[in-house]
Image (cartoon, grey):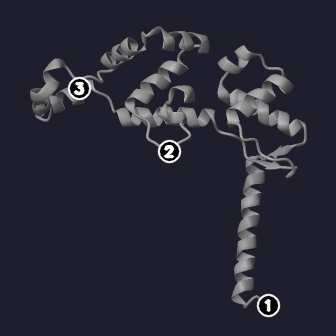
Amino acid sequence: MARHGVGFVSESKGDASGKDLLIGVLICSMRCDEWDELSISGKLPKIIASWMRQINACPPWYLRGKYGRILSSSWIGKRWRKRNSFDLLSKIQLFKQYVDAAQSIPKFIRKNEGGGFSVDHWSHNIEVCLRSEVGWTREEIEERPLSNAIADYFKHLENNGLITILTEGDFEQIKNNDAALERAMAEYMAKGGRN
């Protein structure tokens, strides 16, 4: 989706639109090779227009154009939207939750602070690791859910001793320790920084 500028996975801050929703759902509903073929075939605008008609995203002819806008703001347009349209904003939020869940990474602690960070996109780093060290094939990388790739990647890092994946209990304990340290520091500072 990032290659096609879909707002749900964009690196830049921006809101996803209805077009992003349709393209995102279309991409997620197809195999990668099928999507690549469709995206260069020239049929994409026709398919998106067909989907928009099916979900009633396009108002009927009498609610379009110069006079249609006037009619659309009347009780006729409101009635049509109430009966035939759907809440686009809620569907965008639902798809955003789906994408966010697929991209969620576990909480972890790096064991080795040595070594730099790669300047490559994070997804490229995961792909290289899964192909070279875990043995995933190109088809597996393209077709398996991103959440599986992320889980296998982090499990590989943990198995090699590079990170420790935190359980919810570990994370709660760290938060409690942080809170206790903040309270102790506040008390110390309240005493003027003396024992």
Front-lying residue, 177 or 40:
40
Q: CA distance from mark 1 to mark 2?
A: 46 Å
Question: In this image, 12 relative to 165: left or right?
Answer: left
Q: Which mark is residue 4?
A: none
Is disc 2 surrounded by few (<14), some (14 to 19) or many (20+) residues within 10 Å? few
Q: CA distance from mark 3 to mark 2?
A: 34 Å
Image height of 157 relative to 175, above or below: above
Q: Position of residue 116 (x, y in %)?
A: 81, 47
| Residue position for label 2 | 13
Q: Position of residue 52 (x, y in %)?
A: 33, 19
Is disc 3 surrounded by few (<14), some (14 to 19) or many (20+) residues within 10 Å? few
Q: At label 2, which amino acid type do we have?
A: Lys
Is disc 1 surrounded by few (<14), some (14 to 19) or many (20+) residues within 10 Å? few
Q: At label 3, which amino acid type do we have?
A: Arg
Which label's residue is closer to the chain start, 3 or 1?
Answer: 3
Q: Quarter-wise, where is residue 93 in the image?
A: top left
Classify the position of the N terminus by image quarter: top right
Image height of 29 relative to 98, above or below: above
Q: Quarter-wise, where is residue 189 in the image?
A: bottom right
| Residue position for label 3 | 83
Question: In this image, 166 relative to 94: left or right?
Answer: right
Q: Secondary structure at mark 2?
A: loop
Q: CA distance from mark 3 to mark 1?
A: 70 Å
- Point 23% across, 30% down: residue: 82
Q: Position of residue 6 (x, y in %)?
A: 49, 30
Q: Nearer the viewer, mark 3 or mark 1?
A: 1
Image height of 145 relative to 158, above or below: above
Q: At label 1, which amino acid type do we have?
A: Arg
Q: Position of residue 136 (x, y in %)?
A: 79, 20
Q: Which mark is residue 194?
A: 1
